[in-house]
Amino acid sequence: MTLKIGVLVSGRGSNLQAIIDACDEGKIPAQVVVVISDVAGAPALERARSKEIDAVHVNYSDFSEKTDYEKAVAGILKDHHVELVCLAGYMRLVGKVLLDAFPNRIMNIHPALLPSFPGLDAQKQAFDHGVRFSGCTVHFIDDGVDTGPIILQAVVPVRQDDTPETLAQRILAEEHRIYPEAIGLFAGGKLKIEGRKVVLD
């Protein structure tokens, strides 16, 4: 069985590309069936179209309430029979409508070792704090900010000559590795949530 994935994006879509490539190369038993962006000109939409994947812009400003926006997004995902939703540079907090529509089936990649440095500019937060090790985290989404159960993490040492930009680039390389890996585990039925923990089978 091939897992059907819907990806929510706002920007360039490098993690989207990593997921698409892993699917195309047979590394994970999954297929990206739709990509949805809240930004009309997001390069991620072009990445999807170049692979003949449905790419949809849903303009947040067209809706008076966040719930209505999320109902529209959820409707598109369900129309494509999506089984797992992946956030890839999606810059909006996921609300109750999407969480209820896809319980324990929304993943995110965050460029820090959660629970440290949640939210925006995580790489710069870590760099400015002077940590010796940073990294990235794949986690399930809940109703908090980067607080959901952790699936996989990768550690990236901080070098003496690093800048926030060079650190971010090395973290990104690890994101591209572990995000498809986490999706593969989900597709294989190897992830189970027990309380705050994700148990790997």
Image: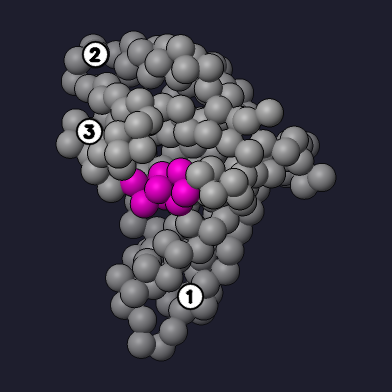
Of labels 2 and 1, earlier in sequence is 2
Q: Which residue is drawn at 50% across and 44% down?
A: 24
Residue stretch rendered in magenta on the structure: 13-21
Magenta stretch, main secondary structure class: helix
> For residue 63, which quarter of the picture?
top left
Query: Do the residues bearing badges 3 and 1 touch, measured as CB atoms within 8 Å?
Result: no
The percent coordinates of residue 139 (x first, y second) are 58, 45
Q: Name the residue under label 1.
A: 131
Is 43 rendered above or below residue 70? below
CB under 8 Å between callouts 2 and 1? no
Place of residue 39 in the rendered image (x, y in percent of width and height, measured from the top left): 22, 33
Residue 163 lies in what quarter of the image? bottom left
**What residue does disc 2 label?**
63
As for residue 49 lying within the magenta part, the answer is no
CA distance for labels 3 and 2: 14 Å
Residue type, mark 1 in image? Val
Cα–Cα gap, marks 2 and 1: 41 Å
Residue 4 relative to residue 43: left or right: right
Q: Which of 116 and 61 is in front in this view?
A: 61
Q: Nearer the viewer, residue 140 or 2?
A: 2
Residue occupying the point 47% across, 33% down: 32
Q: Which residue is rendered at x = 77% and y = 47% of the image?
A: 200
The amino acid pointed to by label 3 is Val
Residue 191, located in which quarter of the rendered image? top right
Give the residue drawn at x 41%, y 44%.
16
Find numbered disc 3 in the image and state the secondary structure of the residue it sits on: loop
Q: In which quarter of the image is the C terminus?
A: top right
Q: Which residue lies furthest to the right in this view?
A: 201
Query: Eyeballing the image, is 144 above or below 110?
Result: above
Residue at image mark 3: 39
**Residue placed most toward the observer, 117 or 188:** 188
Viewer-nearest of labels 2 and 1?
2
